[in-house]
Amino acid sequence: MDQYSILGRIGEGAHGLVMRAVHLPTNKQVALKKLLLKKLEDGISITVIREVKTLQHIDCKYVVQLLDVFPQGLGIVMVFEFMPADLWDMLQDPNEPLLDSQIKTYMQMLLRGVSYLHKNGVMHRDLKPSNLLISKDGVLKIADLGLARLKWINTPKDVSTSQRPYSHQVATRWYRAPELLYGARYYDEAVDLWAVGCIFGEILNRSPLFAGDNDIEQLCIVLQTLGTPTSESWPGMESLPDYNKITFPASKGISMEQLLPDNIPDAQDLVKQFLLYDSKKRIPAEKALQHIYFFSEPYPCSLEDMPKPGDDFRKKFLPKEYDVDEPIINCLKDLKEILG
């Protein structure tokens, strides 16, 4: 830690604190993610190990870069490139709403990052606007791979015996694929594609598409919005673990024109291709990049025309106690308590 000078707090989550710092030997700003051990005898959590190992093998412009990792006290510190904002922040700024051309460029960056992960057998499993960071140069990068998993390769012909089960308790609720809401243990990278569709719709509408307060309400909102699925639109639905535990009123759903008003048909069509009940039919990230949406006016803008968040961009969205203009001694005290 003696190589870093703490500048302030970026945020905190269930696993620890994220601080903004300067790497003294290079004078480069970084983000320090301090992860604490819940119990000393349990050792480092498998989520942390997965995130570190995954990031160490990733080299993509659109995935956040892990610069270093080292033990500190009763935990470890992960060092990332500093990113002054995330996509959620950008969507909250009423003074500078995103232009259609900028939305297209953000979506291209997201899809390129997702395509890279999927080509390398990685399921992110927690894509959402707050996990999509924006650099000072305007580049969108996928972050927070704590729930990421390598996809098991099926070798035998019988998929049911060759594929290993995964946890269904992944992904933030508003972006969780319906198969996960029904308790699916066997799934693939298509859960990320559903999340991409939710993110795209949220960017277009400037509000979440499916905002449930609990899992049952979340599933109800999805079914009421997209319509009650059938055995044709969702093969295998009846075999999902939690399918028979609850029933919902039948719904015809609403059209994409109603769900995404004031948006061009090409955008509505691309969102629709992500938000399909049948996960096998969701459009892959690589194919989505070839959609007509990206080749019609207004065209995706260049990086030079993308929003450039300053170092203190998050200040206007942080609670007062996190205000970077307040005496920084409070942040330093917090970090001292955590580091021990």
Image: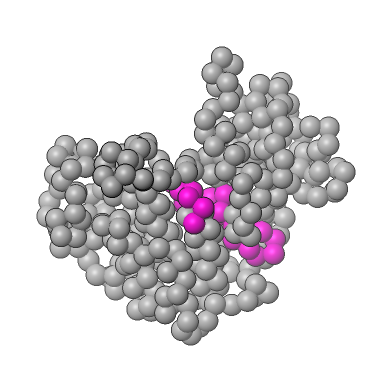
Farthest-out residue, bottom: 297
Farthest-out residue, front: 156
Viewer can see residue 340: yes
Q: Is residue 133 magenta?
A: yes
Residue displayed at 65% across by 65% down: 138
Residue 328: x %, y % from top left: 76, 38
Quadrant in the picture for the C terminus: top right
Q: Is 238 on the left-hand or right-hand side of 8?
A: left
Q: Is 147 on the left-hand or right-hand side of 187?
A: right
Magenta residues? 119-143
Residue 288: x %, y % from top left: 42, 69
Examine the rendered structure and indicate whether residue 132 appears above or below residue 264.
above
Residue 47: x %, y % from top left: 52, 34
Is 326 or 53 nearer to us in this picture?
Answer: 53
Quadrant in the picture for the N terminus: top right
Viewer can see residue 323: no
Which quarter of the picture shows residue 287? bottom left
